Amino acid sequence: MTDTTREITLTVNGTERTFDIEPQTLLVHALRDELGYTGSKVGCESSLCGACTIHVDGRAVKSCTLLAVRYDGAEITTVEGLADGEDLHPLQQAFQEEHGLQCGYCTPGMMLTALSLLEDNPDPTRSEIRDALKGNVCRCTGYHNIVDAVERAGELMAAGEPELSGAD
């Protein structure tokens, strides 16, 4: 640690990580550049596109405008924490089955936003799904397949598919 850095600890996908960081480092950059969790993407850098969405202490947040030092001690889930080894999370399975992605850039943020929705409302209407995802931009799809994927994930989760593991 230098005079300009701060030591912080984050629990990311169930693994506690302590590291030094510049106070002005954004959370998305800490995850990507310092810890190697590259699933969260840097898109607009203004919280408009949702590509950087992660879960912090169980809530979906856009990490591109949040200072990492403010989250010292937080529990973070990234898209890398959804799968349980080779077993896909129901959201990942549903996005694959329903062709809810094309280039994949927005997909991690879409999944983590959808996870928050499904945890709060296991059986949302298509309108509720669209409303929940309104802060996530996709430039490749017409959102129809993404909405289908979130509906399917809700079905899979209700049928007892594995819940969020929090493991790498």
Image (cartoon, grey):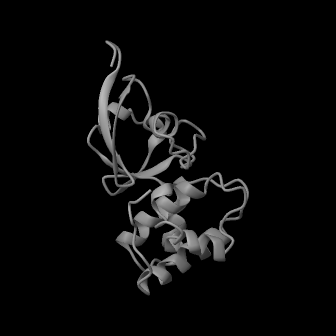
Residue found at the very far top of the displayed protein: 3
Q: Position of residue 103 (x, y in %)?
A: 72, 55
Left or right of 1 on screen, residue 133: right
Report the residue at 50% width, 74% height from top.
90
The residue closer to the viewer here, 19 or 43, is 19
The residue closer to the viewer here, 8 or 124, is 8
The residue closer to the viewer here, 144 or 89, is 89
Report the residue at 50% width, 64% height from top.
131
Residue 67 visible here: yes
Report the residue at 35% width, 14% height from top.
4
Location of residue 141 by image quarter: bottom right
Q: Count the marks: how many?
A: 0
Task: Note whether 79 is above or below 66 in the view shown.
Answer: below
Left or right of 60 on screen, residue 90: right
Residue found at the very far left of the displayed protein: 73
Residue found at the very far bottom of the displayed protein: 159
Task: Note whether 159 is above or below 84 in the view shown.
Answer: below
Task: Note whether 42 is above or below 1 in the view shown.
Answer: below
Quadrant in which the C terminus appears: bottom left
Left or right of 9 on screen, residue 95: right
Report the residue at 39% width, 22% height from top.
22
The residue closer to the viewer here, 23 or 124, is 23
Residue 126 visible here: no
Q: Position of residue 91 (x, y in %)?
A: 52, 70
Quadrant in which the N terminus appears: top left
Q: Position of residue 114 (x, y in %)?
A: 48, 65
Q: Position of residue 36 (x, y in %)?
A: 51, 41
